Image (cartoon, helix red, strand yellow):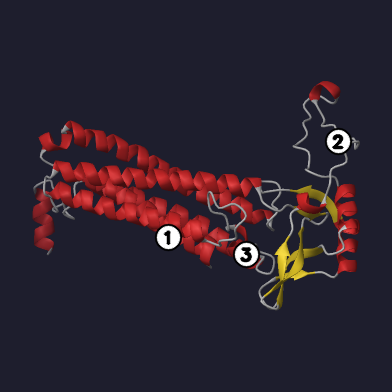
Amino acid sequence: MSTTVVNAEAEGKTWGGGNQPLKASYGKMMMWFFIVSDALTFSGFLAAYGFSRFKFIDSWPIADEVFTHVPFLHGQELPMIYVAFMTFILIMSSVTMVLAVDAGHHMNKAKVTIYMFLTIIGGLIFVGSQAWEWGTFIKGDFGAVQTKGGNILQFGHYVDVDGEKEFERVALRDFVVSDPHADRTQQERKNGLWFVSEGTLPPYTMEEVVHGLETHENVLVRTQIINDEGHKTVLSREESLRQIKEYGKLAVEGANLHVNEYGSPLFADFFFFITGFHGFHVFSGVVINIIIFFNVILGTYERRKSYEMVEKVGLYWHFVDLVWVFVFTFFYLV
């Protein structure tokens, strides 16, 4: 062994593995380095989400109550159906990418073109679906009241379902009426202090919420605290009125980086950051796939007698799909 090292040093060599020690080209090796580093980044984000969630385990929003919307099916509660559809589309796009890479190995330009096109369509559907999901999440559905301590109070009433009472959410707009004579002028720079801006006005004032709650005797308040049965805690009528009157601070609808009608603001922060970061990866992959797609049509890789570029972008696409499996599990299932 020592003789071999000495001979290698005498010949001026520091590495005897050749140009492809792992039977991979330079381009594929660099793609693997990027994937490993990006995997560590996503791991850090998901770990932070996990620690935050378990710190507030008794008040974290329930995914089945948040992600219930499906396009063109307004007013129907279908928990996780559309998110499952998005996941299925992304996984199927990974299958078509595998078929494109395999067709490239056989130098079959026609099949590479077809499967790359299907992969692009799948990616566009996923990105569009995620944009729609963001819009729905931001807009909100029911609204809630944020307390002075930062907690969220939601509204609803009991209904009979097959002989059993179940709590059904009630939107603010269903029992709160805006007072047209109320003074709700938004602060503007020309009428106030310079360099001081005011955010969007709340949909209703607290006086309007209290009045609406008092006039609808069947409406109750539900806190963000999860009880032993795995449901949010519903307060009595008297306690509902007391909580709103004493601790109610702001009426909110939807979610953003400041307030969140679904519960803890941290949930919205992580949702926007992690799904947005992943969505950026998918969008970038779609753009790269489109470039590769047109190169395939132009016969660039046919002339090179190699479709390795399709294989390299395929590695990236499979990584994006795998990351979504973990995001889907952490955010929507667990």
Q: Which residue appears at 87% of the width and 37% of the height?
A: 180
* Dots 2, 1 in contact, CB < 8 A: no
Give the alpha-carbon distance from disc 3 to disc 2, as whole Å: 33 Å
Please say whether residue 309 is visible from this viewpoint: no
Give me the disc on residue 217. none
Q: Which residue is mark 3?
A: 62
Sequence-earlier tag: 3 or 2: 3
- 155 over 208 or under it: above or below: below
Q: Nearer the viewer, residue 131 or 68?
A: 68
Name the quadrant containing residue 51. bottom right
Q: Which residue is mark 1?
A: 325
Give the alpha-carbon distance from disc 1 to disc 3, as whole Å: 19 Å
**Quarter the N terminus occupies:** bottom left
Query: Which amino acid lies under the numbered mark 2 shown in the image of this protein?
Result: Arg
Element class at badge 1: helix
Sequence-earlier tag: 1 or 3: 3
Element class at badge 2: loop
* Residue 250 locus on image (x, y percent): 81, 49
Give me the disc on residue 184. 2
* Dots 3, 2 in contact, CB < 8 A: no
